[in-house]
Image: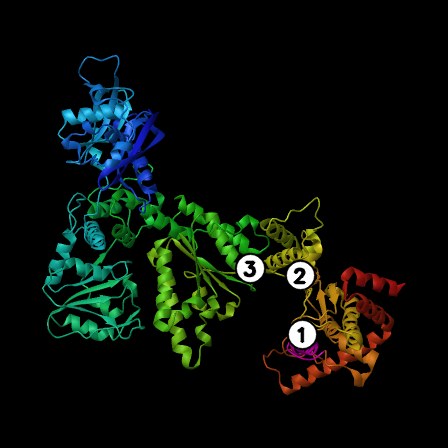
Amino acid sequence: MSEHVHITMLRCLAADGLVVAIAPSYRKVKTDGSQEGLLAAMIGIRNQLMGSHSSSASLALDRVLGFLGQIKPLAPPMAFQQAAKNHPELVSQALVRYFNQPKSDADAALPPPDKASDDIRYALADTPGDPDLDMVTVLLKDHVSGEYATHQIYAEPQAVAASILKYLSEKTDGRYQPVTAFAGTIEQPLSTMSKNEQSLRPARRKATDPLVAAVSVLLDVALERQGVLSQDPQAESGRGLDWLAGLLKARGVVAVVTDIPFGEQVLVRALGRKIELPVLSAAPIGPTDLVLNIAVPTSASFIVIPMTAYAQLADPERVAHDISYSNHAALIACSNLGSLPEPLRTVIETTVALPRVDKAIFERIFAAIYGVEPVWPDGDGQPPTWLRYVRPTDMARVARMQGDAGLAVKMLEKRVVDRLKRLTPDKGPSLSDLAGLGEAKVRAEMLIADVRAALAGEISWAAVDRGMLLTGPPGCGKTTLARAIAKECGIHFLECSAARWQMAGYLNEHLAAMARDFQEARRFSPTIMFLDELDSVGNRDKFSGSNASYSTQVVNALLAELQGFSDRERVIVIGATNNVENVDPALRRAGRLDRVVEVTLPTIDALEKVFAYYLKVHGVALGDGSDIDLRPLAEAAFGRTGADVSLAVRGALRRARLARRPMRQDDLLAELFNRPLENDYVRPLRGEGLRRTAIHEAGHAVLRLTVGAAFGGIAYLSIIPRPDGSLGFMSLRPNPDASTLTRVDYLSLMDVTLGGRAAEEVFFGREAVGAGAGGGDKSDLAKAMTLALDMVCRLGLGREMRLLWRESPSDADAIEAETLLAEAYARAVAMIADRRELVERIATALVERQELSGEELQRLVATDRK
C-alpha cells in the first residue's frame, strides 16, 4: 500500500574537509511503505540535489543526509565557530583543529561571553532529565572514518552550541566535528540504516580507461549471447578479452561488428601485451584520404584493419591473400559485414557483433567504471527512456569529466537528451495543419497508421513501407510533409541532403558522409530519414564523360545503404526531388524507396487554410478589426506553393512594420503581386518614358481582358520601375476552372504576350517601336517564341498540325514558329487598333496613379462597353 511521507534532505557543504554550511530541503514523497522504497525515493532526491550543485561552487558538496519527517536545524556550523570564539575555554586541545582561535590583542575588543563557562551545562541523555535543560540531537562528522553520526544530550536552551562544545571537550577524543543540532530526539540518518548506505555517498570512478572498460563489457555480453561464454552478469569483466587474446594468439582472423568509431583501437589497447606480436594497423594513404593501405609483412604480426571509419581498402585481394597464407593474427572492424570487400569476408574465421546498450548492459558498464550500480533519478528503480540511445563513448566521456557516480547519471541524461532534441520534430506544422498535397497526404496518413501500429506491436516492422519518393515543384511542402509524418508518429527525424554529402569532399569523404547519416538513422531508430535533393545523386542511365565513374559509385553506395538488410527495418527513408526523371530507377523500385508520390500544388480551398496557418504562426488575428479576407488571397495565390504563401506573409508583416501599423489585406496582395517597395535607388519614370510604358502595359491588359479572359483575370497592373530593371508589371490571377489548353488558347496567349509591342506600334508608329518587348529569357519576345516552338515541336499544334515531338527545333520548325509569331503579332496590332480608346483610357489612369488593381481595370473596361 502506498503512502506519502515527509522527509528532510540535508546537504553538508565543506571547505578543506571541514563542514562549514548546511542546506536543508523538505520533500513529500510517495512510497510503498517499505524501508527499501523509502530509501529508493531518498536516493532519487539525493541525486537531484547533487546534480543541481554547481561544480564551480566555492564549497564542495560533502554529503547529502536523509531524515524522516520535517526537522529544522537549531544551529548551523558557524554557530559553533561563534561559540568557540565566545568561550575559548570550552575548546579542548582535542578540538583545536576545528576551532583554532589564537589569542591576540584584538580579542580584547570582542563582546563578553553570553555566560561564564562554569554556567554552561549539559547532561547525558541517559541521565535523569533536568527541567532547565532541553533534549537535543547533535549531528557530528567523524573525521577518522568520514561518517556522520547523531548523539543525544540535554543542553541549555539559550546556549545550545556552547553546551555541545563542552560535551565534546569532556566526553570525546576530538575526532568529531559538530555540524548542527536538532530539537528533541532524531533518529540516525536513514542512509545509515540500510546495507545500501553506500549508495548515498559519492562513488568515484575506479576504471583508469573508461572506454576500455565499456568495450570490455560489450565484448563479454556479445560472447555470452553467442554462447561462447557462460551467462554470468556478476562475473568480473574481462573474460571476453581473455578469449579474444587466446584466439588471436592462435593466429585467428576475427571480425568485430561495432558502431564505435575506431573501436578496434580500443580493443587493441585493452588487449595490451596479451598478444606477443607487433601490431600493424592499416592507415589512410594520405591525410585527407579515406582509402586504407597496408603492406602486410612476411613475419608474424597482429594486423588491424579499421573499416568502421574508412570507406575503402586499397587492393583488398592482396591483403586477404597475405593474411591467409602468412602466420598472422588479424582484427577487422566494421559497422556491418556487408560493407566489407568480398575478399576480406572470405578470410574471416570468427565474427563478434558488439551489442547496443540496454538496461542490463548499461548497469554492467557503469559498475565496471564506478564500482557501483547506477541510481535512477526518479527513484523507482526503472531506467529512463533516454537510456537506449546512450553510446559507450558517451559513458566514457562523462566518466573522464565527472568521477562522481551520482552526478554521472545526470550528465549522461543531459548529453543524450540534448542530442535527441536535435532529432525530435517538435517544431513545424502537424499533418492536420497541412492543406492540399493531394495523394501525398493520403499516403502520409497510411504510413503514420502503419508506424503507430508497429510501435504498439500490432504489426511487425516488416509490414511497414520502407519509404517513399516525394516529387513536386520547389516549395510545395515535401520537407514539411516528411517532418510532419515523424511528428505525428512520435519518432525521430533525421534530415539529410545529397548535396551536403557531396560537399564533404572527394569520393571517399562523400561516401563516408553518406554512411555516417545512415548509421545515425539506425542508432536512433525508429527514425524518418529524409533525403533532400535526391536528384543530385543522378541517374546512371544519363551519366557520361569523366565523372561517370564517380557518380556511378555514389549511386551504388546509396543502393547498398537502401538494401533490405535487417537493421533498416525501423528506418523509413523519404526522398525528395524536383525532377523524378533524374533519380536512378533502381532507387525508385520496391524495397528501396517503394513508391513515387507526387506532392501537388494546393487548391484554392487549401490555400485558404495555408494562409490561416501562417497568419496564426505570426500572431496575426483575423476577425473584428481586421480587413484580411482569406478567400481573395487564396484566389490571388492560386498556382503558388505553401512556401510562397509563407514568404508573402513575412513580406506583408515587414511592409506593415515599416508603415508602423497593423498588417492589412493590401500588404498581402502587394507581396503576392510583387508590388515594389519604395526604393530611392530606383528612378521613377518621367515624361515620354512614362507614357510609353503605360501604353505598353495597357496593351497587354486590354488583350488579357478580352481574348485572354478564359485564362484568368488581372490582379495588379503597375508602371513603377523595379529593382530588377523591368519598367512595368502585370500580375495575373489564374483561373482555377481552366481546362486543358487548345490550339486557339495558345494562339490567344501569344496575342496577349505581344500586346505591349503591338500597342507601341499603333500609338507611336512602326519605326518608333521601343525595345521593351525584347531582352532576356523572361521578355515578351522570349515567352512568345517559347509558346510558338512548343506548339510546333512538342504539342502538335503548329500550322501544319504535325504529330511530332523533339527537344531541339529544326530549321523548318523555326520558320513555322516565326510564321505563327508574325500572324499573332498582326492580330494583336489589329485588336489594339480596334480598342484604341480603351488602351488610351487605361494608359492615362496608369500615368496618373502608377498602378491599378484588377477591379479598377474591370471598371474601365465596363465603361468602354457602355
Spatial CA distance of label 2 from label 3 is: 22 Å
Q: Circle 2: is it few (<14), some (14-19), or many (20+) Cα within 10 Å?
A: many
Q: Nearer the viewer, mark 1 or mark 2?
A: 1
* 780 part of magenta stretch: yes
Closer to the chain start, of discs 2 and 3, is: 3
Q: Is residue 644 above or below residue 52?
A: below
Report the amino acid beneath label 3.
Val
Using the image, tell me which numbered label, if any, was put on residue 672. 2
Please tell me which residue is depicted at 87% across the width and 65% down the height of the picture: 864
x and y percentages locating residue 739 in the rendered image: 69, 63
x and y percentages locating residue 651 in the rendered image: 63, 59
**The one of 445 and 55 positioned closer to us in this rendering:** 55
Please tell me which residue is depicted at 25% across the width and 33% down the height of the picture: 107
Q: Is residue 718 left or right of residue 255?
A: right
Q: Quadrant of the N terminus?
A: top left
Q: Is residue 632 left or right of residue 8?
A: right
Q: Residue furthest bottom?
A: 811
Q: Mark 3 highlights which residue?
A: 599
x and y percentages locating residue 542 in the rendered image: 47, 76
Q: Is residue 723 left or right of residue 7?
A: right
Closer to the chain start, of discs 1 and 2, is: 2
**Quadrant assignment, res 529:** bottom left
Report the amino acid beneath label 1.
Gly
Q: Which secondary structure lies at badge 2?
A: helix
Q: Mark 1 highlights which residue?
A: 725
Q: Which secondary structure lies at badge 3?
A: loop
Spatial CA distance of label 1 from label 2 is: 19 Å
Would you say residue 380 is visible in this rendering? no
* Display colour scheme: rainbow
Q: Is residue 252 left or right of residue 677?
A: left
